[in-house]
Image (spheres, rainbow, N blue to C red):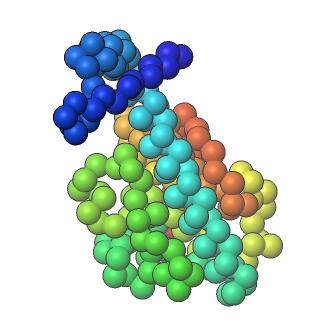
Amino acid sequence: MFVVKLKVRFIKGVRGFTATELLVVTALLSSIPATSYIGVKNKALQIQCASNLRQIGLAVKMFIMSEGKYPNALFYPKEPLKDPRSIVVLLRPYGVNENVFICPTAPPVLRNKGLTYLWNDELSGKPPSRIRNPSKVWMMVDITAVDKRVSSHLGGYNILYADGHVSWSSTPPPLKPSK
């Protein structure tokens, strides 16, 4: 890694850099391949999405501690910000910022709805003791998982599991909405 030290010069009270210093910095920045930048940016968005799912997972754990069961949520409600069975609405009392329900890579049309993740409604209303192998049962996934031709994150999906862990997968979980 190159480190360039620039000296700030004072000329009649005006701070600035020399043209040579600016050319060196410009040359260094322009030598970074665009594909590297895009790859790093996509990875950062994938990590932000995983963080969102972890926060949702913590709120679901608080819900379970309070109610003794998973939220009785819908797979994907028609009005995610208003429907009383929307995971967004059900987790509001647990201090979840509504922005965490939006994947940063989701298309604007989905982002505007306020929810870009799907809820596994097979968990709805069940106590955790009735879930076999929670580390393998998905709880939430990127909405793009409904179409195998589309993926949100570098050819895959972030998945929140019933035990609270989040992982990336190149294949979506089995999606079987109850209704």
Position of the C terminus by quadrant: bottom left
| Residue under the point 59% across and 41% down | 168
| Residue under the point 19% across and 34% down | 12
| Residue under the point 44% across and 80% down | 89
Nearest the viewer among 67 and 111 is: 111
In the displayed structure, 163 sits above or below 90; it is: above
- Drawn side of residue 24 relative to residue 98, left or right: left
- Drawn side of residue 74 relative to residue 16, left or right: right
The image shows a total of numbered marks equal to 0
In the displayed structure, 26 sits above or below 101; it is: above
Q: Can residue 69 be spotted in the picture?
A: yes
Nearest the viewer among 8 and 138 is: 8
Q: Where in the figure is residue 169, as x and y percent of width and height?
A: 58, 38
- Drawn side of residue 176 relative to residue 17, left or right: right
Q: Where in the figure is residue 175, as x and y percent of width and height?
A: 51, 53
Q: Where in the figure is residue 83, as x and y percent of width and height?
A: 37, 81
Q: Can residue 175 be spotted in the picture?
A: no
Q: Where in the figure is residue 45, as x and y percent of width and height?
A: 44, 43
In the displayed structure, 46 sits above or below 137; it is: above
- Drawn side of residue 110 relative to residue 74, left or right: left
| Residue under the point 56% across and 54% down | 51
In the displayed structure, 176 sits above or below 81; it is: above
Among the 4 quarters of the image, the one containing residue 130: bottom right
